[in-house]
Amino acid sequence: MKVTRWQIWKKVIYGNKNAFKFWSPKVKGEGDKTVAKNSSIKDWRKIIVLEPTGSLETTFSMGFSDIFGNTKVSSAKRKVKQGSFGMRMGPDDCGFFVVSNDDMVELKFVEYADITDEAKSELQLY
């Protein structure tokens, strides 16, 4: 998988229209129960694959909410036309979403995968 290394995760309030105009509903990701609660992100192998839908030229950023209510949005940007992407899954459940200032983008669960899955080698991972 192609890992996006240079991104900043900014803390936000989910749904805050002053931060972003458009917020997708959250997609629940079930945590990886095979990793320890205090494990490092380097040890996380489970990936949730998500597919954005909407106008192909719409730019968006990825976000998540953890079990503690912390909500963060990545500084990385994608366009809907780039297709599916992956997010790492730790031991706890998370809610994943996308935000945009251009237009509404919906988000759909595709599948779970392992970070070493050769069939997913072209998948961008955040």
Image (cartoon, helix red, strand yellow):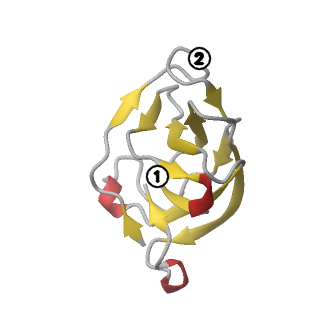
Q: What SS does tag 1 mark?
A: loop
Q: Which residue is mark 2?
A: 17
Above or below, 18 relative to 82: above
Check disc 2 and give the amino acid type.
Answer: Lys
Q: Is residue 9 visible?
A: yes
Q: Residue at x 57, y 35 (%)?
A: 99
Q: On the rendered image, what quadrant is the N terminus found in? A: bottom left
Q: Residue at x 57, y 17 (%)?
A: 16
Q: How many marks?
A: 2
Residue 121 placed where, x, y %? 46, 79
- In the image, taking residue 50 as reference, residue 20 lies left or right, namely left
Q: Foreground mark, 2 or 1?
A: 2
Q: Residues within 10 Å of mark 1 (few under 14, many from 20)?
A: many
Q: Residue at x 52, y 25 (%)?
A: 69
Q: What SS does tag 2 mark?
A: loop
Residue 122 placed where, x, y %? 48, 76
Residue positioned most to the top: 18
Q: On the rendered image, what quadrant is the C terminus found in? A: bottom left
Q: Which residue is mark 1?
A: 90
Q: CA distance from mark 2 to mark 1?
A: 28 Å
Check disc 1 and give the amino acid type.
Answer: Gly
Q: Residues within 10 Å of mark 2 (few under 14, many from 20)?
A: few
Above or below, 80 relative to 103: below
Above or below, 79 relative to 117: above
Above or below, 44 relative to 26: below
